[in-house]
Amino acid sequence: MNDSIAKTGLSLADAPLLRAQRVAAVAGKHAASVDREARFPSESIEALRNERLLSSYVPRELGGDGCSITDLVRQCLVLGQQCANSAMVYAMHQIQVASLVRHGLPQPWFERYLGKLASEQLLIASVTSEVGTSGDLRSSICHVETDGAGFKLRKDATTISYGSEADALLLTARRAANSAPGDQVMVFLPKETYRLSNVGTWDTLGMRGTRSPPALVEAQGSLEQVLPTPFAEIAPQTQVPFSHVLWSGLWLGIATDAVARARAFVRAAARQKPGTMPPAGLRLAEVTSTLQLMRNNVFDVAEESDERMQGSDNESLTDMGFVLKMNNLKISSSQLAVQIVGQALQICGIAGYKNEGKYSLGRQLRDAHSATLMINNDRIHQTNASLLLVHKDD
Ligand SMILES: Cc1cc2nc3c(=O)[nH]c(=O)nc-3n(C[C@H](O)[C@H](O)[C@H](O)COP(=O)(O)OP(=O)(O)OC[C@H]3O[C@@H](n4cnc5c(N)ncnc54)[C@H](O)[C@@H]3O)c2cc1C
């Protein structure tokens, strides 16, 4: 066993987590300027590349770490505690990698690309949103126009995070000009196969460093770049579970950071008056129990996802009870992140309200507010309401 790993008491399987902790230290140093200047967290992404973490979900035989979804959640959690923007870029990239690994392999084209991604540490962005469909993941207007073994497409996207900084895009489109809005495929676009234009602005309340403006994507390539599995299967088997679980992991990171700040505040108050309990002590006890609830929920669903993904039977991921559980994870963790940061703010008071200082919570609160909007919770409630009409209780 590697000496530095042995000293921590962690096993070799934890090595990616140690590497993520080193990246988190870099991310923390630059988090305030990334947020203030609404700039891409280039230092964190460079650190992720140096630590070879962009390929952590790529199978070992192709040069990656072969991490599980629970491993990725732990990494998102440590990054999220320092810089939610870096954690979100990392999570979104891993969702795209997972889609290629789980639905592109064993096609030789995707095997070659994943090997290249591992050796060159390439970053992939997502293009599911579209002008006219907004947050409806399962509907597209644009379509793939085939011409022999090649294709062309044009997509007007409302939101593409780090599109200008990415090395590739994974995009949803209708299968053909005469396909229904829900008959979608995923098209993988390495940099040399697309052009981004009409890139708009991204001046938002939070998640400012994800740099997610609207943009027009024009692409041309080979049909080998189209994932063989329909998006109707990729969405429930990979895109949705990975999004909900990894996002929840980083939102848990934001909440954990906020509670750590509140705890430091209460301890400092206790030191000033030894022998007495600071008034906010009770509130701190209360918020830690909410944090524990959130944490248990995130890891419970992550571990169940791993169990279900280990088998070759992808159908078990679309089991109605599990879909409800996964959707409920997204809804509850997006709400709890805001609630927990709010409770921490109540504890820290004006010191938390200030934009500077070790108890400041403004950035965490603004970042957390993106969570309920990123695939609007109302859409998920609507889906759950329909499922609950027919689902038999476990
Ligand atoms: C930080 C951040 C990063 C993002 N990055 C990306 C990215 O990289 N790539 C990408 O493609 N997208 C990205 N998105 C966009 C995201 O995936 C959604 O498309 C977007 O958040 C939806 O925006 P919306 O509010 O316009 O749309 P909608 O989801 O359409 O919501 C608009 C309103 O309509 C209501 N509504 C609409 N339909 C329903 C329904 N069926 N049931 C109930 N209520 C409904 C909602 O409640 C809401 O009030 C990102 C978003 C955020 C916040």
Image: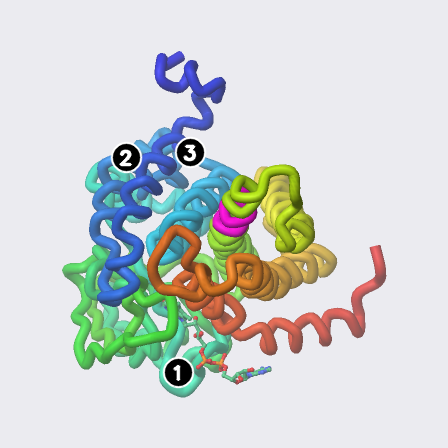
Q: Which residue is mark 2?
A: 51
Q: In the picture provided, is 154 more to the left or to the right than 265?
A: left
Quadrant of the frame with the C terminus: bottom right
Instruction: Give coordinates of residue 124: x percent, y percent.
Output: 30, 55
**Callout count:** 3
| 263 is within the stretch colored magenta | yes
Q: The residue tagged with tag 3: helix, strand or loop? A: helix
Q: Residues within 10 Å of mark 2 (few under 14, many from 20)?
A: some
Instruction: Find residue 289 and report its horizontal and vertical position in percent.
Output: 68, 49
Q: Which residues are magenta?
A: 261-267
Residue that protrudes farthest toward the bottom in the picture: 132
Percent of width and height locating residue 47: 25, 41
Camera sees residue 50: yes
Residue 230 in the figure: left or right of residue 28: right
For numbered disc 2, what is the local secondary structure? loop
Disc 2 under 8 Å from ligand 1? The reply is no
Front: mark 1 or 2: 2
The disc, 1 or 3, on the residue closer to the chain's N-terminal end is: 3
Mark drawn on residue 141:
1
Q: Earlier in the sequence, mark 1 or mark 2?
A: 2
Residue at point 50%, 56% (across, down): 251
Q: According to the image, label 3 marks what residue?
A: 17
Which residue shows up at 49% across the image and 18% down it?
9
- Estimate how packed mark 1 is, as few (under 14), some (14 to 19) or many (20 or more) residues with alpha carbons within 10 Å: many
- Does 25 appear in magenta? no
Q: Give the distance between the C-alpha atoms of the residues marked 1 and 3, in whole angstroms.
A: 40 Å
Q: Are marks 1 and 3 in contact (CB under 8 Å)?
A: no
Determine the image quadrant of residue 118.
top left
Q: Nearer the viewer, residue 217 or 300?
A: 300
Mark 1 to mark 2: distance in Å? Answer: 39 Å
Dot 1 falls on a residue whose secondary structure is loop
In the image, is 313 to the left or to the right of 149? Answer: right
